[in-house]
């Protein structure tokens, strides 16, 4: 059977998290009532003029720098002309021959090795409106348009066709999204459409790509991987039967797990690009680029390496902690107050992240300092791990400090030997059968006795001490 | 006779891209008119522009920005007030997907 080489190129669209739109002062907030965030500019009414949002340009430059791209000193916007009701002006302001940035790469791991996936270009354009089809039953023959999204700044990152498997595509997207999120220029939320991805796929030979198809409508990274696998399989079967792949746009159907041709529903593309006359060109000089370079935060890969070296963390921990910038920041703040990185890491990766999952990180009520307080209570032995988990949950809910909760709930672990000794005496007296079992060599009996002691103290006894005392009692009785 | 610059098929194609419905008479008429306009403009081709960069803007300005600040938006009622067809707060258009 013939072997083919897989060529995949991805076009990623990222909505930038500016407050206002790209060419006007309308809000960009997701989920607003339809057509409440529009104005004459983004509706394309006659006589209006667009003015470029500086921040959107800066966010794009910052991303380009982080992806090792070359910033084009001279660039401009262009009109992309096509008729579709999601565009109120019948053209989209985009970039064509002179994008903001060219080249660059995203590093991924492929077969255990580092591989650079090349970037072709990064440009800025305005998003289109949102079309709703078939949701309103009595109006089956119509589509409905909400222009709230029209004009939101959209950054397009086009990769070179250097991705050679669906798994590499997945990895590319995960790493790209992580970098963009670290930069704080977009939340990259696929459910809300602030990250969207189309793919170009072809099967070819070692140095020659085959006829490609474009694949759309994948709504998560997993669907992208699945969609690519399905499309590769389809092309492979065609070629194996001696048939040809037709260059076309296809849509992924997540229910049927297949790709379908959009043929007949699509116009021949002739966008008749020309320079946007309403917008003067951009001139991005060195000093501007340098200023932006200075505000780029440490990127995920560097931070991952630093966590390993500076804190002596295992790779696994460093990976989990640096997955999101917020978590990594939180971890580092905690370590400042409580300089035992591995213990902090265990807590942050465990209970903290479990609790954060349900809540937005920005709404977290528990400060790094109070997590550090909690950990020092565990370290001192005032709190058992189980109790600490409870306290942490309460801290999440109420935002109260660790010591306050311990006080209020009377949670202090009993580490006082004298008072526990008395309880241990009682336990041994009240459970003669267990004592006999132990004497007969059933070592499990000691666990039962320690359990009884924990019950009597409502779980507050220091478990190591409880164990030690019970063992001592048993030995005294038998000795 | 001089070679034609534009033919009727091109006119039909452009009319389609612009979503214009032309009658056969109009197609003829516009082909003829466009031919005349383009031949007139073709005079410009006589100039040697080999070393002149393309001009897209005539004013020597660049980097005209606004800050990322919110300004007014229309209410949905206002936004829809010119719409030929609407449903609730949406613009209503002919169905575009099968």
Image (cartoon, grey):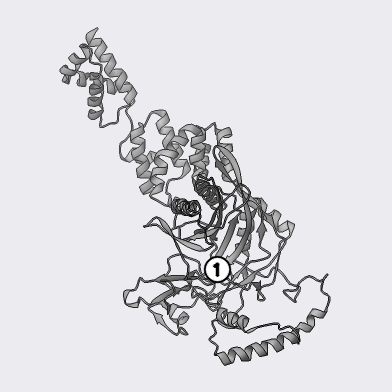
Q: Name the residue located 24 percent from the left edge and 25 percent from the top edge.
A: A453
Location of residue A10 (image quadrant): bottom right
Residue ID for mark 1: A21
Task: Decide if residue B92 is in sight here.
Answer: no
Q: Name the residue located 72 percent from the left edge and 61 percent from the top edge.
A: A73
Give the structural element (helix, strand or loop) at label 1: loop
A325 lies above or below A343: below
Label 1 is found on which chain of the structure?
Answer: A
State which quarter of the image contains the N terminus of chain B. Answer: bottom right
Residue sitting nearer the eye, A389 or A306: A306
Q: Is residue A131 left or right of residue B32?
A: left
Q: Position of residue A113 (x, y in %)?
A: 58, 38
Q: Is residue B9 left or right of residue B5?
A: left
Q: Residues within 10 Å of mark 1 (few under 14, many from 20)?
A: many
Task: Decide if residue B48 is in sight here.
Answer: yes
A212 lies above or below B91: above
Q: Position of residue A436 (x, y in %)?
A: 18, 14
Location of residue A21 (image quadrant): bottom right
Q: Position of residue B85 (x, y in %)?
A: 42, 83
State which quarter of the image contains the C terminus of chain B. Answer: bottom left
Q: Position of residue A281 (x, y in %)?
A: 70, 69
Q: Name the residue located 65 percent from the left edge and 76 percent from the top edge.
A: A278
Residue sitting nearer the eye, B9 or A448: B9
Residue sitting nearer the eye, A249 or A347: A249
């Amino acid at each position: 059977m013939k072997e083919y080489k897989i060529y995949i190129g991805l076009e990623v669209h990222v909505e930038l998290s500016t407050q206002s739109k790209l060419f006007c002062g309308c809000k960009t907030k997701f989920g607003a009532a339809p057509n409440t965030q529009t104005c004459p500019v983004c509706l394309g009414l006659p006589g209006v003029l667009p003015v470029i949002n500086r921040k959107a340009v800066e966010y794009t430059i910052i991303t380009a720098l982080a992806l090792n791209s070359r910033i084009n000193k001279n660039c401009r916007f262009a009109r992309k002309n096509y008729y579709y009701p999601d565009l109120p002006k019948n053209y989209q302001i985009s970039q064509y021959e002179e994008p903001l940035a060219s080249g660059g790469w995203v590093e991924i791991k492929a077969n255990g090795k580092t591989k650079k996936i090349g970037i072709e270009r990064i440009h800025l354009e305005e998003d289109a409106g949102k079309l709703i089809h078939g949701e309103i039953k009595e109006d089956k023959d119509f589509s409905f348009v909400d222009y709230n999204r029209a004009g939101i700044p959209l950054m397009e990152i086009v990769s070179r066709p250097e991705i050679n498997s669906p798994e590499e595509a997945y990895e590319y997207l995960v790493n790209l999204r992580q970098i963009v999120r670290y930069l704080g220029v977009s939340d990259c939320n696929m459910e809300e459409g602030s990250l969207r991805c189309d793919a170009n796929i072809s099967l070819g030979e070692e140095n020659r790509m085959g006829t490609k198809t474009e694949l759309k409508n994948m709504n998560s990274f997993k669907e992208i991987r699945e969609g690519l696998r399905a499309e590769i399989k389809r092309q492979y079967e065609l070629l194996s039967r001696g048939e040809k792949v037709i260059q076309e746009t296809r849509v992924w159907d997540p229910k049927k797990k297949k790709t379908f041709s959009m043929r007949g529903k699509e116009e021949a593309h002739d966008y008749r690009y020309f320079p946007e006359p309403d917008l003067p060109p951009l001139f991005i000089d060195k000093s501007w680029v340098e200023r932006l370079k200075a505000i780029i935060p440490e990127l995920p890969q560097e931070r991952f390496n630093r966590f390993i070296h500076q804190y002596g963390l295992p790779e696994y921990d460093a990976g989990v902690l640096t997955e999101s910038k917020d978590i990594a920041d939180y971890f580092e703040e905690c370590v400042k107050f409580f300089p035992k990185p591995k213990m902090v890491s265990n807590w942050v990766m465990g209970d903290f992240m479990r609790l954060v999952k349900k809540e937005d990180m920005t709404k977290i009520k528990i400060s790094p300092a109070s997590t550090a307080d909690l950990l020092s209570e565990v370290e001192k032995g005032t709190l058992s791990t189980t109790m600490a988990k409870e306290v942490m949950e309460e801290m999440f809910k109420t935002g109260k400090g660790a010591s306050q909760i311990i006080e209020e709930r009377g949670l202090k672990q009993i580490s006082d030997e004298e008072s526990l000794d008395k309880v241990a005496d009682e336990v041994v007296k009240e459970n003669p059968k267990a004592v006999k079992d132990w004497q007969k060599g059933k070592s499990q009996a000691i666990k039962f006795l320690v359990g009884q002691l924990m019950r009597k103290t409502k779980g507050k006894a220091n478990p190591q001490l409880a164990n030690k005392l019970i063992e001592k009692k048993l030995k005294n009785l038998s000795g | 006779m001089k070679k034609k610059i534009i033919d009727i098929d091109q006119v039909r194609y452009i009319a389609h891209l612009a979503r214009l419905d032309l009658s056969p008479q109009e197609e003829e008429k516009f082909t003829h008119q466009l031919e005349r306009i383009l031949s007139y403009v073709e005079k410009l081709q006589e100039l040697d522009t080999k070393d002149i960069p393309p001009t897209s803007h005539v004013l020597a300005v660049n980097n005209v920005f606004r800050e990322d600040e919110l300004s007014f938006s229309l209410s949905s009622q206002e936004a829809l007030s010119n719409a030929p067809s609407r449903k609730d707060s949406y613009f209503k258009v002919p169905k575009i997907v099968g």
